[in-house]
Amino acid sequence: MRKQIAAANWKMNLTIEEAEQLMNEILEAKIFLEPQQQAVFAVPFPYLINIKNKIGEQPNFFVAAQNCASEKSGAYTGETSAQMINSININYVLIGHSERREYYNETNEILTKKINLALANNLNPIFCCGESLKIREGNSQNEFVQNQLKESLFHLAAGEINKIIIAYEPIWAIGTGLTASSLQAQEMHAHIRKVLVDKYGEEISKTISILYGGSVKAANALEIFSQPDVDGGLVGGASLNAQEFITIIKSLKKINCPIN
Ligand code: PGA
C-alpha cells in the first residue's frame, strides 16, 4: 500500500519563535497516524534541526528541506548540498517547486541533477510538477506534465523511481485560492499514474504516492484526498495555521480505504 502524505511547505515564512509555536500546537494535538500515513514539514533551512528535534520520536512525522543544490560540493556560495541535508538526518527534500522553476530558472535538466544527488544521499525527493493557466487553457496540461516527468525522472531505474513522491501542483492554483476541482485533480493524477505504468509497469507505479498541491485547506482536503489517485497534499498557506493543518493531516485516507 502506498503512503498517504500531508506535506507542509512553509516557504519563506515564520521566525524561529513562530515556527516552534506552530509545531508545538500541531504536536499537542497528538494526531495518531496509521502506519501508511505521514506528516512531512518542509521548513526553512535554518530551522531544520530545531524542528527535527522538536518532532523527536513522534511516529510518522518527518522534516523536509525545501530545496538542494544541483552540484555536489565546492565553491557555490549560499547553496546547500544534498549531502549536508542528509548529514543532519533529514529524510525528504522538495525538488522543482514551481516557485523555484519560475524565480530561480530551474529547468528540467537542472532538476535531474538535483534528483540524482538527492537519491545518492538517501533523501526522498518530493518532485513537483504542474502546468500554468495558459497551458491548461490550451488543454495541453497532460503532455506538459508528462514531459516534466520524462525529462527529470525517467532516467531512473525501477529501484529508484519508487523513492520519489510526486506532487502535482497546477501553478494557477498555488496561493491563488483557486483549487483544481477534485475531478480535475483525479484526472491529472490518473494520467500521471498511467504515464508511470507505461514506463515502469503496474506493480511499481501503484506504490508511488502522488500528492495534490494548490490551495488545499481544511475545508477541501477531505474531498480532494478521497479521490482514488490522490495520496495526500502539499500545502502552502494553510500549513501555517496549526488548526488548518491538523484537520488536513486528519483528512488523509485511512488504511481500510480501497486504493487502486
Ligand atoms: P498553497 O501552496 O497551498 O499556498 O497554494 C502550495 C505549494 O506551493 O506547495
Image: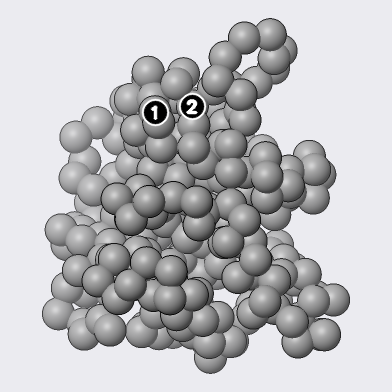
Give the quadrant of the N terminus.
bottom left
Check disc 2 and report the residue beneath it: 82
Inspect this view and state whether residue 110 appears: yes
Task: Report the side of 39 relative to 147 (left or right).
Answer: left
**Element on which disc 2 rests:** helix
Which label was assigned to residue 121? 1
- 63 and 112: which is toward the camera: 112
Task: Report the side of 238 relative to 244 (left or right).
Answer: right
Counting the numbered discs, the total is 2
Location of residue 149 in the rendering, given as x and y in whole percent from the top left corner: 57, 61
Crowding near the residue tagged with mark 2, few <14, some 14–19, many ≥20 C-alpha atoms within 10 Å: many
Task: Identify which amino acid the numbered label 1 is placed on.
Answer: Asn
Rounded to the nearest whole Å, what is the CA distance between mark 1 and mark 2?
A: 6 Å
Task: Identify which amino acid the numbered label 2 is placed on.
Answer: Ala
Query: Is residue 223 shown above or below 77?
Result: below
Disc 2 C-beta below 8 A from ligand 1: no
